[in-house]
Image (cartoon, rainbow, N blue to C red):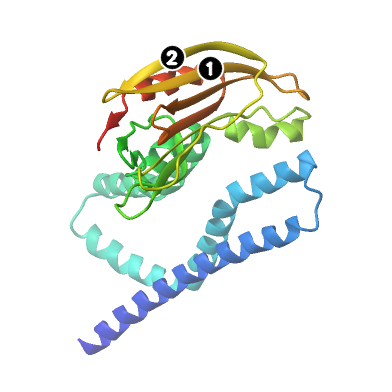
Amino acid sequence: MLRKFLTLCGKVLFRVAFAGFIVLQLVVFVLLLWGISHFLPEDNDFVTAVGFVLILTSPFLVGAGNYLIFQRMTRLQYVLAESERWLAARGKLDASDIRRRYRVRRWLIWTPALSVLLFCLFLDETWPPTSHLLHPRSGKLIGYQVPIPFRWTVIFNEPDDGRNDRSYFYLNRWGGTLRAGIDPFIGRRPSMTASSLGCSSSSSQGFEVYSTTTSPDQLIGTRTYTLAGVPLNCAEFLSKDQWTGEESHIISCLNVTRDFSCYFSGKQEDVADVYRMMQGINRTK
């Protein structure tokens, strides 16, 4: 009994140590890329694309390598355990049941890898809800509850915790993230699109928040929303990049008490999300 317990403890410690070894490899790999980036030109699209692809594929590369190492280190133990299990199962099941269980187990082995692959292939759709789970209180600002659009990714935030004088969140919505890493290799310009949206508020005892100043090309229109009797004024502009000629929409919102503001810059198709969010804002104080 004691020998079995010590053997089990040894197996558990070995797997915990091996998991720590994998995490250490990922950290070293990221630090290595960070160190190499200081010696490479920052304005080179090819170098940027290579770095982007390496960061995305590093978990797969490290995981595959460590899987082979683990299989080789535990091969003898695995063969012995599987032979004993197989002999015991064969005495209870017929051949068809054994084959069926083998097929199910073979598919289950690939489930984690397929899940990660699907997550990365549809990163534009899977990462936003993941970020909402990681930042569940992002919309709780000082004096306001903001309904954050589900399709937007929470980049960073500082929600109201009752002690701070300022609270804010910053969102992004990307399109073509995975494709942008491949475009430079096939001679295309990176096709990733991005829109940004940020809101901030301050307590009446803290500093005031002012809207971001811009130099728009054209005023499209204005809208006014009411938050518990306090007007929230929004102005929408159409701006054109002087280098690329690409047009982007800019929305700047500020309430009359100057303790809440939002700023949007991005694609026209994301403008509707901004106005829906403004309509759903509730004042909590």
Q: Taking 184 as reference, is 87 above or below it?
A: below
Query: Amino acid under label 2?
Result: Arg
Which residue does the image show at 38% across and 44% down from the upper left? 107
Q: Taking 231 as reference, is 82 above or below it?
A: below
Instruction: Give the alpha-carbon distance from disc 1 to disc 2, as whole Å.
Output: 8 Å
Q: Secondary structure at mark 2?
A: strand
Q: Position of residue 195 (x, y in %)?
A: 55, 28
Q: Quadrant of residue 25?
A: bottom right
In front of the other: 24 or 153: 153
Query: Amino acid under label 1?
Result: Glu
Q: Quadrant of residue 24?
A: bottom right
**Dividing the image into 4 quarters, which one contains the C terminus?**
top left
- The residue identified by callout 2 is 223
Q: Secondary structure at mark 1?
A: strand
Q: Position of residue 217 (x, y in %)?
A: 67, 16
Which residue does the image show at 56% across and 10% down from the upper left? 220
**Dividing the image into 4 quarters, which one contains the N terminus?**
bottom left
Q: Taking 183 as reference, is 19 above or below it?
A: below
How many numbered marks does the figure carry?
Answer: 2
Q: Position of residue 97 (x, y in %)?
A: 24, 47
Dot 2: few (<14), some (14–19), or many (≥20) neighbours within 10 Å?
few
- Sequence-wise, which precedes: disc 1 or disc 2? 2
User: Which mark, residue 56?
Assistant: none
Left or right relative to 245: residue 137: left
- The residue identified by callout 1 is 236
Which residue does the image show at 26% across and 88% down from the upper left? 3
In front of the other: 141 or 258: 258
Q: Taking 245 as reference, is 65 above or below it?
A: below
Q: Residue furthest top?
A: 220
Which residue does the image show at 20% across and 60% down from the upper left? 91
Q: Is residue 187 visible?
A: yes
Dot 1: few (<14), some (14–19), or many (≥20) neighbours within 10 Å?
many
